[in-house]
Image: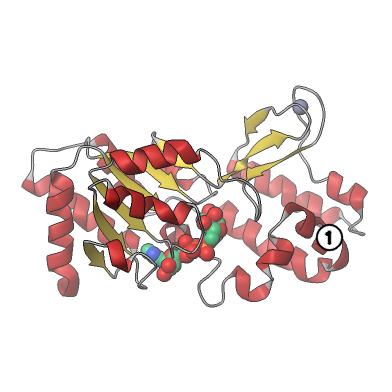
Amino acid sequence: MGKWRQELEEAAWVLSKATRATAFCGAGISAESSIPTFRDPGGLWDQINPMEAGTAKGLLRAFQEKSDIIVPILMTMLDRFEKSEPNAGHVALSHLEKMGILKTVITQNIDNLHEEAGTNDLIEVHGNLFRMHCLSCGWKKKVDRKPYVQALRNRLLKIAVYDLDALISLAVECDQCGSLTRPDVVMFGEAVKSLPQAFDASIQSDVMMVLGTSGAVFPAASFPVEAKKAGAKIIVINPTENGFTHCTDIYIPMKAGDALPFIVEKIKKSTEKQI
Ligand code: NAD
Ligand code: ZN
């Protein structure tokens, strides 16, 4: 902590005065839960072209034409999503909410870990991998993360030829109409979810923490800019400098899972705000 103590203490002081702070999170906050980011060196986008496999149509084509590349990558990702648990960063955010400091978490992550850590006011702008969405009637249903991943992996292992029938066999059936569902996540080219709510939360915040996001994915990356314009203080926690330098008030070049618990403890010690 030593090197960044002043920044951490400043962040704790600013947050201790806040009542409607937001956290704007990216893949980096789940990196310490062993879910790799996509953009960092060695991440997914070093292995496959996002413009190719990042769309629903492209992913289906890649399954059929490059299953030898896609399936092992998918298996590794499923393994990470199954084994992950909320980390100290996720838990610290849920504490800040209970302390009446943090109002809303806006996340780009799809891994369900904020909810599992106890965050209630959550906007998932890229959706949730563990919520199924019926392609016919629009019905949505949450599935349990670990059993769903295990079942999906077992079904994948049974496939000999990656044709359309095999791919259909991977989908969960809709409880309402029996049609096919897909995970309710935003792929490349699809509309970001709950955008008006996320903008609203951004412009109403007194402080915005920007945690583990590179700022490369728009329109989500404009939330801190809008928050700043509306008067919020911007605290960035990311080991690597990101696209928000121009609007940052306090920059802490640390892992979220190290910095956030320190900040929460500091606030608890300096105020009466308890969980
Ligand atoms: P990104 O562009 O938000 O980049 C990740 C950022 O996290 C980088 O700036 C990196 O420096 C930072 N980081 C790495 N470890 C950190 C740590 N311990 N603490 C704080 N910051 C840390 O994200 P991406 O990987 O390019 O992903 C793009 C999109 O793909 C996401 O917006 C999301 O929708 C999806 N995605 C989701 C997950 C998930 O749900 N866990 C994981 C990967 C990608
Ligand atoms: Zn249906």
Question: How busy is the neighbourhood of tag 1: few (under 14 within 10 Å), some, or many (20 plus)?
Answer: some
The residue singled out by tag 1 in the image is 61
Which residue is located at x 92 percent, y 59 percent? Answer: 161
Most distant residue in the front direction: 229
Residue 140 in which image quadrant: top right
> Considering the image in quadrants, where does the C terminus appear?
top left
Question: Looking at the picture, how far across and down is residue 193, in whole percent?
Answer: 55, 41
Query: Is 28 left, or right, of 104 in this rendering?
Result: right
Question: Quick one: 61 or 169, which is closer to the camera?
Answer: 61
Residue 161 position (above or below residue 179): below
Q: Is residue 264 visible?
A: yes
Query: Is 142 left, or right, of 59 in this rendering?
Result: left
Which residue is located at x 14 percent, y 45 percent? Answer: 16
Question: Looking at the picture, how far across and down is residue 207, in whole percent?
Answer: 24, 48
Q: Is residue 34 visible?
A: no
Question: Looking at the picture, how far across and down is residue 223, in whole percent?
Answer: 39, 50
